[in-house]
Amino acid sequence: MASHVVGYPRIGPKRELKFALESFWDGKSNAEELHKVASDLRVSIWKQMADAGIKYIPSNTFSYYDQVLDTTAMLGAVPSRYGWSGGDIGFDVYFSMARGNASVPAMEMTKWFDTNYHYIVPELGLETEFSYASRKAVQEYKEARALGIDTVPVLVGPVSYLLLSKPAKGVGKSFSLLSLLDKILPIYMEVVAELKAAGASWIQFDEPTLVMDLDSHKLHAFTHAYKELESSVSGLNVLIETYFADLPAEAYNTVTALKGVTAIGFDLVRGSNTLDLIKNGYPLGKYLFAGVVDGRNIWANDLDASLSTLQALEGVVGKDKLVVSTSCSLLHTVVDLVNETKLDEELKSWLAFAAQKLLEVNGLAKALSGQKDEAFYSANAAAHASRRSSPRVTDEDVQIATAALKGSDHRRATNVSARLESQHEKLNLPIIPTTTIGSFPQTLELRKIRREYKASKISEEDYVKAIKEEIAAVVKLQEELGIDVLVHGEPERNDMVEYFGEQLSGFAFTVNGWVQSYGSRCVKPPIIYGDVSRPKSMTVFWSKLAQSMTQRPMKGMLTGPVTILNWSFVRNDQPRNETCYQIALAIKNEVEDLEKAGIGVIQIDEAALREGLPLRKSEQQFYLDWAVHSFRITNSAVQDSTQIHTHMCYSNFNDIIDSIIEMDADVITIENSRSNEKLLSVFREGGVKYAAGMGPGVYDIHSPRIPSTEEIVDRVNKMLTVLDSKFLWVNPDCGLKTRKYSEVKPALSNMVAAAKLARNNL
Ligand code: GLN
Ligand code: ZN
């Protein structure tokens, strides 16, 4: 019985890749040093998988930035503005595409399906010339082989690659990305030929778009692509990986009929329908890679339950064709539980990170082949029993309060236009006010202070003093710049979710539980293991202090319930919406305490609301209903004159604009600068009854580039063609924590100048 892993975290158990990348970008180390760290990481992962007994070990799942960008490099599809003229794609060009450089902005980045991982969106047009430009897949295969490890090279499949792309600027509306299929397939064929020549016997194409709602035209592209590839892959075992959701029946029929494909991988954690489809018929002689070990979570697998699923599948596909696998790449979970020194043993027994999941996969495969490790299984069963009965998990008061919410609606008593009037009066803001999203640069010094305080190396008094000074400096800077609604800069926060989770009950924290978000950026999601409540106020002290330093309105800054939920590892023993309602009640208490403390503007960030949207349309409305309801619960009881802001990142709002309006916030600021046109079109096309404050980000904070006043004015003016000036706000795209002051000061100064110009032009 064989075992397989779809993909593995690449950042390293102690974020080695992150530090190597950042030091390289800062000019503190050279390319050779970066290569060395990367290769050490790859080698140790391959060895670890081999030691864990994994039979089908993936390669080319490493990336210096992103696997989709790697595919763009493989295909030579570099947008012309990066000045690449053939040959090897060096770090210069590669990282410019990812991050922009002094003269050219980065390519667009967007969420990878419904995860918190971001990929670099390929920009393809009729002019794009494809060529086999990056041999990374082959090099990595050879690198592993040199160690005596025969791997399964992984490529982003050709159809998913195109479906995840966007048309380059200037191509006509009639342009279809899939029309490029026949241009990229020859390059895939070259790659396959080289892999074969290097000795590969398996190849994995990740085609996760198969789980989406695809029309027959798109499904046909898969049929076409793999028929075209058939002769070049002959002699190879071809695995098509699907993940992140159930497979719709039509997609299932398509993928099981693909030519030249000998194996299909399914996400069976999120895929109970898929399981039924398989049981109703699976093509004879094809391998089934059964993704029973959850790649999206940190909970220990219920081995007994998985084993019975696998046994049932064995009956369908036969013993020698069943392979135990992960539900998706382990990229989306934490690297290794071994590095957790602060979690207690009971909680640890409930968990499995990537390294432990390897053992689960192997343990399942062994049990199926009659070599069940009884000790491993009974420890697992005991852990599940303890989790089910633990008093740490259940808080009766919270259960009662949440149950009482069900079925009722929560909204503010007056409508938004009346509220805006009363806020306008109280806050006395100019037309087209300026603000920022919350965080200011987090200097090394600041991180050090927090770290030392956490480690009890400095006293609370010294800590408060240092943070207070930081807030004072941020307030002063904003006043000097002439920003209208101020923020305190969030210097006391390491992370917008962690900060709250640490103060709420029901949450646990890892010391090393990092998951890659984009490039070198990682997040450390809290683990929600029990019922959530708020023992005491979380932000009032700092917000009050900050407000006392200025006459201008100071925004209270909270993270909303849906974002806390979506950026945490959520318990899998009750429905997500129940956990979300619990968090909403806790945040509601905080909102009310801020209001009582005299904070007149409160921003409740729902940065991640959009990314929790289920991939399949049939499930979306239910999610949006409870997510929006949770947000409304938090501020349903504030006065008209208290202005509620919300902020969202990286979103494609067009399809959920009705839900955004339903959130009933007074002002919403959103990420927009990498996709201005999309938002404009929402309003331009009309039919949207939007009558609240709106701050579409006027510049990209993910790039070091400083926007000019002219370009911001231009954006603002464009917005004014579709949005009434009384609704418009001017702000950056997102928080400034990852930027340097040398970038933030001129950028904000240009932003304020632009807002003034726009005001004067009215
Ligand atoms: N208030 C947060 C900040 O500025 C929002 C961050 C986010 O949207 N991701 O950092
Ligand atoms: Zn944001």
Image (cartoon, rainbow, N blue to C red):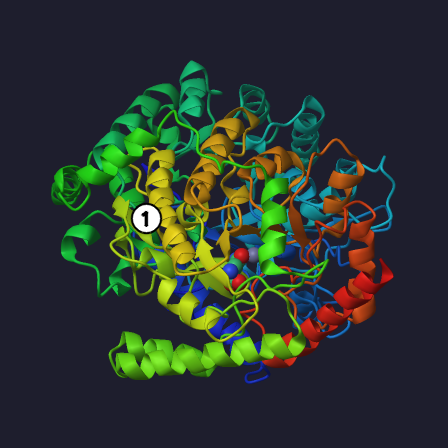
Q: Does the closest atom of ligand 1 sit within 8 Å of the Cβ of label 1?
A: no
Residue toward you, 166 or 280 = 166
Q: Residues within 10 Å of mark 1 (few under 14, many from 20)?
A: many
Residue 516, percent from left and from top: 47, 58
Q: Residue at x 65, y 66 (%)?
A: 99
Name the element at disc 1. Answer: loop
Residue 268, percent from left and from top: 40, 31
Q: Relative to 761, does residue 269 appear above or below in the rendering?
A: above
Residue toward you, 176 or 432 = 432
Asked if residue 258 lies left or right of residue 37, the reply is: right
Residue 4, percent from left and from top: 39, 43
Q: Look at the image and tell me in which quarter the N terminus lies.
A: top left
Q: Relative to 90, does residue 156 appear above or below in the rendering?
A: above
The answer, for residue 196, to whether it is visible in the render is: yes
Number of dots carrying numbers: 1
Q: Quadrant of residue 162?
A: top right
Q: Residue at x 30, y 65 (%)?
A: 511
Q: Residue at x 45, y 24 (%)?
A: 274
Q: Look at the image and tell me in which quarter the C terminus lies.
A: bottom right
Q: Relative to 549, does residue 571 appear above or below in the rendering?
A: above
Which amino acid is tagged 1?
Ile
Residue toward you, 101 or 52 = 101
Residue 562, percent from left and from top: 44, 44
Asked if residue 175 lies left or right of residue 674, the reply is: right
* Residue where numbered disc 1 is placed: 298
* Residue lying at the far top of the rendered structure: 280
Residue toward you, 604 or 170 = 604
